[in-house]
Amino acid sequence: RNLMLTMLLGGLWHCDAWHYVLWGFIHGDYLAVEKMAGADSVTTASYRSSGSLFLKRVLVFHAVVLTWLVFRCEDMARLGQYLSALTRFESVERVTAGMVACAGVILFGWVSQWINETTPLPDRFQATPVFLKAALYAGAAILIMVFNFAGPRPFIYFRF
């Protein structure tokens, strides 16, 4: 009850439009189901050992991303267009460099998480030569500069 109420209020806080409230309701529902299933702690042995952890992560990721469509679309027609395009593997909007960068970051996250399950990344990073660490930091800085070509953007909540 408290999770649901908090998420509904979170949706209302964004704006009093139906899609924000629906977004809050769906996220509250996700949290309530997770809590009732006892899967709200990744540290519990039953959560780590039951089924494939990778498939659970993929399922949760895609459920949350699909829910963000509700947040983004102001009406049911637009939501229908997005969902329809997803099932036909078409694009409603053109693919931008930012989208490609975002997909790359997500892929990097998945790969590094998979690697971390076999050898912890901090240990691996500590063993990396200093020049390679410097190259990684420089590469990250360059990528940030390259994909930040749109210039400064106004604070997102000024729209609400």
Image (cartoon, rainbow, N blue to C red):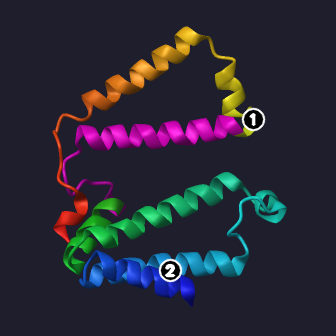
Q: Position of residue 19 (x, y in %)?
A: 29, 79
Residues in magenta?
A: 87-116
Residue 85: image tag: none
* Kind of residue at disc 2: Gly
Q: Position of residue 97 (x, y in %)?
A: 25, 37
Asked whether residue 101 is drawn in magenta, I would say: yes
* Kind of residue at disc 1: Thr
Q: Residues within 10 Å of mark 2 (few under 14, many from 20)?
A: many
Would you identify the image quadrant in which residue 14 lies?
bottom left
Earlier residue among tags 2 and 1: 2
Q: Position of residue 148 (x, y in %)?
A: 24, 35
With 91 as the anchor, is 68 left or right in this view?
right
Q: Which residue is mark 2?
A: 28
Quadrant showing the N terminus: bottom right
Residue 118: image tag: 1
Q: Position of residue 71 (x, y in %)?
A: 31, 71
Q: Residue at x 56, y 87 (%)?
A: 2
Q: Nearer the viewer, residue 128 or 77?
A: 128
